[in-house]
Image (tube, rainbow, N blue to C red):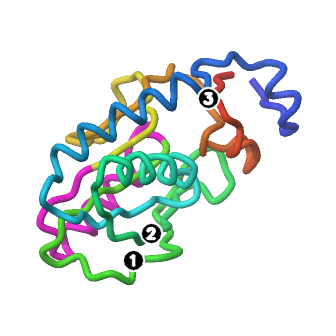
Amino acid sequence: MTLPVDLAAALANAERVHDRLVIERAIAQMAIRIRNDYAGDTPLYLTVMHGGLPFAAQLALALGALNLDLTFDYVHATRYRGQTSGRELHWKHRPATPLRGRRVLLVDDIVDEGHTLAAIRAWCATEGARDVRIAALAVKQHDRCVSGLRADYAGVDVPDRYVFGYGMDYHEQGRNLPAIYAL
C-alpha cells in the first residue's frame, strides 16, 4: 500500500484512536506514578526530539503541579531521517548535562520496536547514569520490541498500524495534532 504524502489525505483515511481528553488523563496518571517514584530526587528529564516534545512539555507541567522538580535537557538521535523505516542511529545532539550518578527519565512519544530508545538508554548507562527509565506517551501493541525494552511509564496503547499526531509525524507533518490517529 502506498501512503499519501498529503496530511489532509492521510487524515481522511485515518481513525482517531485517542482524543486529547484521553491523552491528557493518561498523562496526569503517569505524572502521579513518576512523582511517587522520584520523590526526594531531581531527575534529569531528557526529552527525545522531535517526537517527544509535545508530550514531554505536558508531562513536565503535570509533574511541576505535583511539586516534582526536574533538570531539563534533551537528546536528538534518529534512525528515520524523514523516512518511514529506520536505519543506523544518527546522533544530532547529546545532552550537555553530565549524566554520571543521575537518575534519568527519557521522555518520548512512542515505544514501537524500540531500537532508537534502546540505543539512547544504553548510551545513558555508558555515561554513568545511576538509573534510566522511559516515559512514553504511546506503546504500539505488537511483539517486535527490542528485547528488554519497555516503557516504565506508558500513557496509551496504540494499534500496530502507522500512527501519527501528538508528537508522532506523518511524513514530517502533523506532530502538533491534538489527538492520535492510525491509518
Q: Exactly how many numbered labels are in the figure?
A: 3
Depth check: 180 or 88 in front? 180
CA neighbours of label 3 inside 10 A, class few (<14), some (14 to 19), many (20+): many
Mark number displayed over residue 95: 1
- The kind of residue tagged 1 is Pro
Drawn side of residue 58 relative to residue 165, left or right: left
Disc 3 marks which amino acid?
Ile
- 10 Å neighbourhood of mark 1: few (<14), some, or many (≥20)? some
Q: Secondary structure at mark 3?
A: strand
Q: Is 73 located above or below residue 173 in the figure?
A: below
Q: Position of residue 30 (x, y in %)?
A: 33, 36
Work out which quarter of the rendered image holds the N terminus and state it.
top right
- List x then y, in percent, for residue 139: 41, 31
Point out the tag, 1 or 2, that comes first from the N-terminus: 2
User: Residue at horizontal 78%, vertical 30%?
Assistant: 3
Check residue 74 in the rendering and tell me which mark sits there, or answer none: 2
Q: In terms of depth relative to the viewer, which is nearer, 158 or 135?
A: 135
Front in this rendered view, residue 124 or 1 = 124
Indicate left or right for 64 with 168 as reference: left
Q: Residue at the location (51% across, 46% down)? A: 55
Q: Quadrant of residue 15?
A: top right
Q: What secondary structure is marked by label 1? A: loop
First-in-chain label (2 vs 3): 2
Query: Is the C-beta separation of discs 1 and 3 under 8 Å?
Result: no
Residue occupied by mark 3: 180
**Label 1 to label 3: alpha-carbon separation:** 28 Å
